[in-house]
Amino acid sequence: MKYMRLLAVFCLACLVVNGCSKKQEEADKLEQEMMAQETAVDSAAVDTSSAGERAALDAAAVPREEPSPFVPVDVEGEGYTVQVASCESLDYARHLVQVYADRGYEPYLTQFEFEGQLYYRVRVGKFENNSRAAALKAELIDKYSVDAWVDVL
């Protein structure tokens, strides 16, 4: 009888540990997917060709006349927005805008200067009231674990 109780406790402990490890595996998998999305751009930018070859490929591949679809905008008016990032790199800020656009949101860029340094803000949505912006902030934090906050336009 004593061994049966010990066996039951051992089996119960194994089930609890197995259940927790599956949750951790799911969280790890989600984190890896998010990291893979963000590092895909970084790895695509790495090129082993010489500087001359890269310059020739860049000149041939990217027409210089076309502006980027994600340029900083001046947002005027009243309301609220959710800021998800502030970057020194315009390229990285554009990448984040593309990521949030692919996720189904309406992101945009703004820029501001602080102590001589230019920053690019990645923001999502324009709302008339704070409660709708706060709901989007909560959704972004819950889904993507970002450090987002509501800001006044």
Image: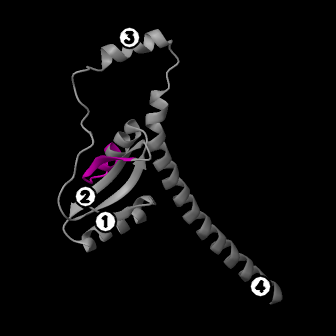
Q: Earlier in the sequence, mark 4 or mark 2?
A: 4
Q: Earlier in the sequence, mark 2 or mark 3?
A: 3
Residue sitting nearer the eye, 16 or 135: 135
The amino acid type, in three-letter code, at marker 3 is: Ala
Q: Residue at x 26, y 20 (%)?
A: 64
Q: Is residue 70 magenta?
A: no
**Residue 136: mark:** 1
Residue wearing tag 4: 4
Residues shaded magenta: 98-113
Circle 4: element type:
helix
Verify CB contact (< 8 Å) between mark 4 and mark 1. Answer: no
The amino acid type, in three-letter code, at marker 2 is: Gly
Residue wearing tag 3: 56
The amino acid type, in three-letter code, at marker 4 is: Met
Q: Residue at x 50, y 46 (%)?
A: 35
Distance between the alpha carbons at the discs numbered 4 and 2 = 60 Å
Q: Nearer the viewer, mark 4 or mark 2?
A: 2
